Image (cartoon, rainbow, N blue to C red):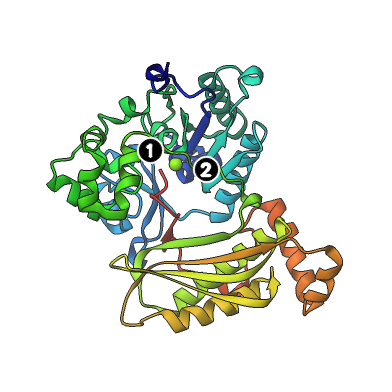
Amino acid sequence: MPASRCLTPPMNPRIILHLDLDAFFVAVERLDNPALIGVPVLVGGRPDSRGVVSSASYEARKFGVHSAMPTAQALRLCPQAVLVSGSRGRYDEMSRQVMALLGEYTPLLEPISIDEAFLDVSGAEAHYGPPGQLARTIQDRVEAELGLSASLGVAANKLVAKIASDFRKPHGITVVPPGGEAAFLAPLPIRRLWGVGEVTGRELARLGVETIGDLAGFALEDLRARFGAHSEGLWRAAHGIDESPVVVEHEAKSLSREETFAQDTRDPELLRRELLRLSDAVASRLRRHKFVARTIAIKLRYSDFTTLTRQTTLDDPTDSGPIIFAQALALLEAAWDRRRAVRLVGVGGAGLEQPARQLRLFEQEDPRQAQLDAALDRIRARYGESAIQRASLLEEPEALWVPKGKPED
Ligand SMILES: [Mg+2]
């Protein structure tokens, strides 16, 4: 009966959870200082030093304050707000605890920022009950054991699960049943969709597209004429179709770190420091997963969103922060047009290999550096990624960057 085949839901739909902590930085500050509970709180840089807001409590958001807004402007909108400078190390540490808790439920865990992660819990129903119940269990445990509020989305894919976690924020749970993806998305504003940024959003608005459902109403061929190669991805997203897997870090054949500056910059020293920090983070992750990278890459995005990537291949693959940094800096210096302001930099390692232990002894040029790296890794594993930093990172102006992707919320 071929006619009925297309009406049958997929035999084994995946079950993907997306967890997003609510006003995470503010919540951590409140754990440490209960006097901040119930009052408008901003975590961010000082208003007199170009500081920006990296997290605003929901009380402050009522006044129009949001992440990435200059602190001076936020304080004009909400003068009674309490400004806290924040402690990245403390946030990393709490994030690590949240991820460890999530890891108890599935090895298929993909943290995508300091306060967000995907979990693939397909097939776990026998163990944990229906997925909505599992989401509630996780939400309750995060609150009871770590004192943090989380919102969760449950769906058959990452795209829909992520949009669902945002649907009833804060402290919400939204379950989208398999087959219900397109209906769930249809009434939502088009900007909620992944891949719809400023430019695509404006173009879609000209076509009269306001909701995701409006976009889903277009035939793929009609979109192709306007959006070219981008159109199929858009069309599939509008229908709630996404087959991308939950990617576990150590299975990745490449890994990278990037930061968007809160304000575009032409300051070479600031770029150098950010590159050093990212190189160290990439090296640390390589070592944690016992990989070395043969290819080192950088990513550079200018203020007009033009993006360059450059890479270099090494004779001897490495997991050393100083070596990765030296390569990344050379690539940056060759690629960067200094007249143009930079919005984002990234550092990545690719061509990952898992060398035999004996080989590695000879690869490491400087045994003292290897010992230092190992000591740094032990401290980071115990106290979180930014518990220790090289001395030149410590002068970093506070809160000049925001986490990757959308601002923390
Ligand atoms: Mg969040």
Give left or right: position of 10 versus 341: right
Above or below — where is 389 with respect to 61? below
In the rendering, which numbered label is found on residue 39?
1
Above or below — where is 223 with respect to 199? above
Q: Position of residue 357 (x, y in %)?
A: 84, 64
- The CB of the residue at mark 1 lies under 8 Å from ligand 1: no
Of the residues shown, which amino acid type is indicated by label 2? Answer: Val
Circle 2 SS class: helix
Residue 225 vs residue 152, the one in the foreground: 225
Of discs 2 and 1, which sits in the foreground? 2
Residue 394 appears anywhere in the view: no
Residue at 83% in and 75% down:
362
Of the residues shown, which amino acid type is indicated by label 1? Answer: Val
Q: CA distance from mark 2 to mark 1?
A: 14 Å
Q: Position of residue 125 (x, y in %)?
A: 60, 20
Q: Position of residue 44 (x, y in %)?
A: 41, 55
Image quadrant for the N terminus? top left
